[in-house]
Amino acid sequence: MHNATRQKLQRIVDALKIAEDRQDIAQQIALYEELVKEKPDLALGQAQLGVLYWDKGDEERARNHFDQALALPQTDHIDSLLFGRMAKSRLYTGNLDRARAWYNTKPNLWRLRLYFESLNQAERFEEAETLLLNLLGGELPREGQLLTLHMMAQVYLYTGRTHDSVAACQAGLEIDPTCEPLIFNLAVAQEMIGRYQEAFQGYNRVLQLDPQNNETHNNLSHLMLRLGEFESGWRHYEWRWGSALKDQHVDFPLPRWQGEPLAGHSLLVWREQGIGDQIMFSSMLPSLLERGGALKYEVESRLVPLFQRSFPDVELVQRSPMSIEENGQEVSKLAWPATDYQIPMGSLGLQLRPSLESFPNQAGFLLADPEHSKQLRQEYQQLYPHKRLVGVSWRGGNSVGNQKQNRRIGMSELVKLNALSDVQLINLQYGDTVAEIAEAAALGLHIHNDARIDPLRDIDAQAAQIAALDAVISVDNTTVHLAGSLGTPTLALLQLNPNWRWGLQEGPSYWYPSVHLIRNHQISTWAPALDKAIAALRTAGQL
């Protein structure tokens, strides 16, 4: 190396120390860029530059430098910088073959994290379990034992083996009673099997060790809301932005509405989460309108026609991206209408639903297109005279493992609905249903499919369809929210450990009084819940 080059590198290293002491990220990036330009084969430099871009939120640039670092001779330090971050990104977890190859080339705990997350994403749970059992059967350091037991607990949760998950957590906590991930996982498993008091204690134990743990606050909020402790639950719910919804948060230069009088003022309510959540949170819109003021309300574009009809006095708005220049760089931001206050719709509960008594007994709050609905009902009645028209939806959720399995009724069980001889089932299931409807038909269950209606494209059309029916029977998915918001009598079949929004009891939902909750108390079969639904549909006045 020439003396001039050596001096230049030393100057960069000295300047980096100063920039790091000052926590000047922009200067650190500039210096590392200069460093890797001079020495592109410096793996640690490539890794550090990638980490800076990653922590800044620029995953594409980070990935470029991660890949360059990984193409060079490795050290455990570089693995510790990269693989923990990579395990949190679909850019890496989505490539199982590559994650497996990286792990097999150099097995260590850092690479295990990425390999494990890739197996989970691919739903290769048996392979994950075999990998972890083999590791536990060998010599592992204390840290490795804790990590492996933590991963085992997760695999068991994903596959519905909740009691095994509890056992794996307890085995790890015998090694280290203060291991936060294991305490958290144990609380999750306990909540899933209805041991709510123990779960509550576990979440609070994590918060004693780490008061700023976003995920624990978020889970605690769900538990409290499930138990009807609404005021405390909504307060903890504000932590959702640091965990489950961190990619959806919007920073505003506007004051957050804290329940101030709205007369003479304007309020922007902005959307969050999925279609079903937006519908559910919008059940608070009539209560909000009673506060007065000018309301600007955002929902996903697919919901706009339905909301325009239902709330003609509300100004529906859409966020629009715009580019502005800051410090000489082009920055992408969102443009919003002028307003006095703002609030995300999921935070309305803190102001409007502090107790069970604050939920109104409203039959419905959304209005389907009456002409379209009338036309559909007439058509269905002509096709199936003297039959009650009942919509059906049998699966929901895109999450891996147990949650998706729990919200899916197979056609071999759904065929029990044939017992309702005076009912014609109408397909309300979103997504591709051709194979399932054909399977049902082969079993003797006829489900009418109206190919003109695609809820993934036109929710307003499905709203008209649901309003044309006598009743709906569905697992927990968007169909339940839409039917409930329209006031259509609905039987919601809930899995063993349903979402927090459905509380603990069977019977009418406090979010949607027209929705009757039926709880399934088994993992392996939906038969008991379906029997209850059939009995309710047979009994006049039950819906």
Image (tube, rainbow, N blue to C red):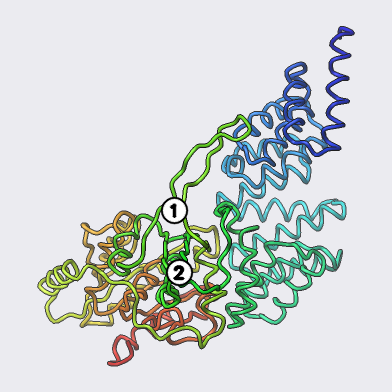
Residue 528 seen in render: no
Residue in view at x 71 percent, y 38 percent: 104
Q: Name the residue under label 2.
A: 264
160 vs 496, nearest the viewer: 496
Image mark for residue 337:
1
Classify residue 180 as left or right of residue 505.
Answer: right
Foreground: 376 or 96?
376
Q: Is residue 348 left or right of residue 206?
A: left
| Quarter occupied by residue 438 | bottom left
Q: Which of 140 and 256 is in front in this view?
A: 256
Which quadrant of the figure has residue 542? bottom left
Residue 258 place in picture, x, y as percent: 58, 70
Viewport quadrant of the C terminus: bottom left
Residue extending furthest toward the left: 382
Residue at 47%, 86% (x, y): give it. 506
Say if residue 405 shows up in the picture: yes
What's the residue type where badge 2 is placed?
Answer: Gly
Give the SS element for disc 2. loop
Relative horizontal placement of residue 323, taking residue 138 as reference (left or right): left
SS state under label 1: loop
Amino acid at pointer 1: Pro
